Amino acid sequence: MTDTTDISHIRNLLTQVQDPEVPVLTIADLGILRDVEFVDGVYEIKITPTFTGCPAMKAIEENISEVLVENGIQNYKVRMVMSPAWTTDWISELGREKLRKYGIAPPSQSTEEHLKAILTGKNKAVACPFCGSVNTRLTSAFGSTACKALHYCDHCRQPFEEFKCH
Amino acid sequence: MNTTTENNSALFEYLLRLGDTSLILGHRLAEWCGHAPILEEDIALTNISLDHIGQARLLLDYAGKIEGKGRSEDALAYHRDARQFRNLLMAEQPNGDFGNTMVRQFLISVYNFHLYSALSKSADAELAAIAAKSVKEVAYHVRHSSDWLIRLGDGTAESHERVQQSINDLWIYVDDFFNGDEVDAMLVSQNIAPELNAIRPLWNETVQLTMVKAGLQIPQVNSAMRTGSRKGNHTEYLGYILAEMQFLPRAYPDAEWL
């Protein structure tokens, strides 16, 4: 049994898998789920890591297995693909909106702009997810998880997290 | 040896150099866990450590596959001795004070930034993919360590003096970054690795930019430069790191987290 219906069925099932660290997002919103293919009688689920040391990748693999097994799919394997490298540019518009509502600022610039800004030191201001003001400042580029930075809004006087450009 | 074997052993060596530098620097930064001057810095240093260890895992895993003797990332990390390690001498230097750690991080991160940017165009697709992923993490390490260099260099008289002293002390390990050998030459000829001579001016420029902003001086210590990491000639510090890092998997070879 291998037709496109099965593949889109599996893809649909997998869009329910949440990110363990940011449960408001699914692995599809984040762009971690790269592809589903049927190769030699096995469904190959291709995922790509976000940060190299992200401890959530293991949990994501386990969550994918859980969803598939619960739905009676046994002939699958999860494969990690490295290229092209994951980027926050792949976070969907819906994903960005969900992040904002959850209180996390979505990435403020594209990866390319960000890499240029590293050498020049000119970074775009991050809009506060609570009040929308850009009167904010970076407190630390490193936060509670590898993918987040800490900011402070000088307008509504709230600390907030930003999903880092990557 | 046939050509494929020679190519593979050069690539294996090269991957060990990159992977070991990440692993040893990641381990050094992890020593800060619970000891940093403020909570945000504790989190930052361990986040940077996590990035380095993540990069080391990918590089050593790939090295094991290229070697083709069935050695895993763990076998390479935990079951080699100091002379078999290929990390840059800079990476194994002790943490010292916070400024010292930041100088070490800054000098290596700027190097990694330009090296990985070039490697992301490598003819070896797997290495290019790892480099493209890593360079985005390294960019944050460059920014963080540059910010601190400026803050300390342009801070109080004491912070300025101490961070300048760290630069003077660590500068003797800079030539080791660029001291390429036949492995580099072979991979350069196959477009797998970049010319280190092309990386050095980029490195100089980025370092100089921050140094000027920080009011810090590049020391003149060319005669005392230490090199040798590519042949496994290390400073005395590596043995102590390995003794701690490798103790558990050597004492209990099949131990697993449960």
Image (tube, rainbow, N blue to C red):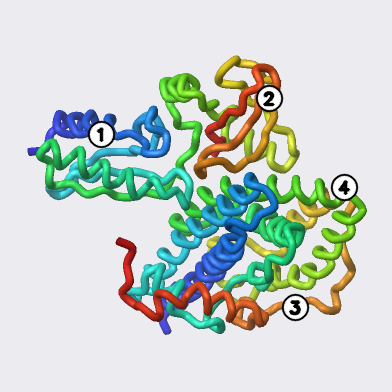
Task: Give the residue number, with chain letter if any, for mark 4.
Answer: B154
Chain on which label 3 sits: B
Q: Which mark is residue A14?
A: 1
Element carrying mark 1 = helix
Q: Secondary structure at mark 4?
A: loop
> Pointer 2: residues within 10 angstroms few (<14), some, or many (20+)?
many
Q: Position of residue A65 (x, y in %)?
A: 22, 44
Find residue B69 and report its image quarter.
Answer: bottom left
The alpha-carbon separation of the residues under discs 2 and 4 comes to: 24 Å
Q: Are marks 2 and 4 on the same chain?
A: no
Give a yes or no on whether discs 1 and 4 share a subunit. Answer: no
* Residue B245, horizontal then vertical, whole percent: 50, 72
Circle 1 or circle 4, nearest the eye:
4
Residue B187 visible, this orientation: no
Q: Amino acid at mark 4?
A: Asp
Query: Could you say whether the residue bearing mark 2 is in a helix, strand or loop?
Result: strand
> What label sits on residue B226 in the rendered view?
3
Q: Are marks 2 and 1 on the same chain?
A: yes
Circle nearer the viewer, 4 or 3: 4
Name the N-terminal-most of marks 4 and 3: 4
Are the two marked residues, 3 and 1, in contact with CB atoms closer than 8 angstroms?
no
Task: Count the labels in the image.
Answer: 4
Q: Whole-percent x and y of residue B77?
A: 46, 72
Residue lying furthest right in this view? B157
The residue that appears at 75% across and 68% down in the rendered structure is B174
Q: Looking at the picture, which amino acid does disc 1 mark?
A: Leu
- Does A13 sit left or right of A41 as displayed? right
Q: Is residue B176 left or right of residue B184?
A: right
Name the kind of residue labelled 3 in the image.
Arg
Which residue has dot 2 on it? A136
| Residue sitting at x 46%, y 23% | A102
The span from disc 1 to disc 4 (Cα, nearest Å) is: 52 Å
